[in-house]
Image (cartoon, rainbow, N blue to C red):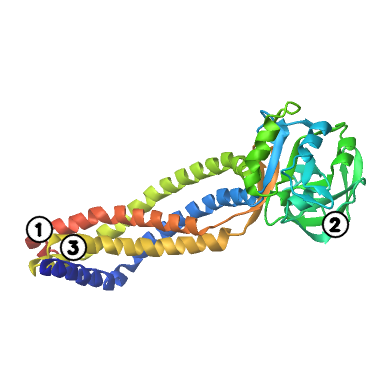
Amino acid sequence: MTRLFNWLSQIVVLTRFSLQTAPERKGAAAVAVCGIAGVVAVLIGVLSIAHGFRQALTVSGSPANAIVLRSGGDSEMTSVLYNDEARVVGDSPALLRTAEGPAASAELFVIIDLPKRSTGTDANVPLRGVGPAACQIRGNLKIEQGRRFESGRNEVMVGRGAAREFAGLNLGESLKVGGEQWKIVGVFSAGGGIGESEIWADAKVLQSAYRRGTSFQSVYVKLTSPAAFQGFKDALTTDPRLNVKVVRETEYYAEQSQMLFDLITTLGTFVAVLMGIGAVFGALNTMYSAVAARTREIATLRALGFPGGPVVISVLLESLALAFVGGLLGGGLAYAMFDGYQTATINWKSFSQVAFAFAVTPSLLVQGAVYATVIGFIGGLFPAIRAARLPIAKALREL
């Protein structure tokens, strides 16, 4: 126990001495810290895109909601349902019912071209025809400006994300869709979810404008409880009148975000690894310089009886301390620059634009700190070993 205590005490003494002399090497230390900060900021910044996109989709779902699609369809774009089928879905006893009827909304999903405000280039914007129960099913929907569209009229309300990103969607303006003019009567929010990227209209009016007859593409429903989902799914998928698949809303949106999330995460990690290699060389250079500058000091300490182990650990801890500072700086920089930044990108499942905000989450900040620590460890390991292996007699003769 005494030997262990002495060993730990030696580590504390050497580390304190190392950190106290760090200002003498502030130039090299600043290079290492800034390099690591840059790597961490880029890593967190890129990954915040993926997390923000996923967050926009996943917050849209509720475990008590379900989506009914044509069997085999992996999105609304590849699904078609007819009025009789939508009626069968709406008659299910598993649905929540109010004085206004069952919580079921047969919906139509079309894509229109609108110019982006930032670039003027056309983008695919989702236009959704919804039923009367749509707002009840999406419990987080709130009218921010104006009012809800009236059934049976050529009126639309737009999500605030769509209004922000695309031109021609200001309250009171008219929008030409399907050869007809539609008045924009409201702007709504949906808790930051994907609904804010959409334009909503009455489904039956939209059917007529696009000559869709009695066809829909999906039916959104709210169940009496999340536990009712399995019974609801089994009843519909075994009904001979239907050929449908039933998914939880949360699972549907999670799957919708997976492709882009994986792509951005893979590319972001690849870029961060390449930059991290450069940061490791920077840390190596810094710590080798530190060891070279302290050659006689380290040799003197070794001559006084300090073993190689504490020397290795003290140099490593100095490197980790620099990396920790770099990680904090990079995380703070990423949070200040990227968190909440509003943009829009394409959802490759629906081929439509999704407006979302970058999300610098606590898990990303932790991930950045861990990555900085790894860089600091690798960058300090070999210089630390060199410091411990310095021949004492030769090192004492260094100028």
- Mark 2: which amino acid? Leu
Q: Which mark is residue 311?
A: 3
Q: Are marks 3 and 2 in contact (CB under 8 Å)?
A: no
Kindly state the secondary structure of the residue where label 2 is placed. loop
Q: Give me the disc on residue 187.
A: none
Spatial CA span between label 1 and label 2: 78 Å
| Closer-to-camera residue (203/297) | 203
Residue 389 in picture, x, y percent from top left: 14, 56
Front residue of 251/8: it is: 251
In terms of image quadrants, where is residue 181? top right
Image point (18%, 68%), residue name: 8
User: In the visual, does 327 lie left or right of 253?
Assistant: left
Q: What secondary structure is found at the residue carrying circle 3?
A: helix
Mark nearest the camera among 3 and 2 is: 2
Instruction: Give the residue number, with chain letter if any, for mark 2.
Output: 171
Residue 397 visible in the picture? no
Q: Earlier in the sequence, mark 3 or mark 1?
A: 3
Q: Earlier in the sequence, mark 1 or mark 2?
A: 2
Residue 19 falls in which quadrant of the image?
bottom left
- Amino acid on which the number 1 mark rests in the picture: Pro
Element type at marker 1? loop
Q: Which residue is mark 1?
A: 391
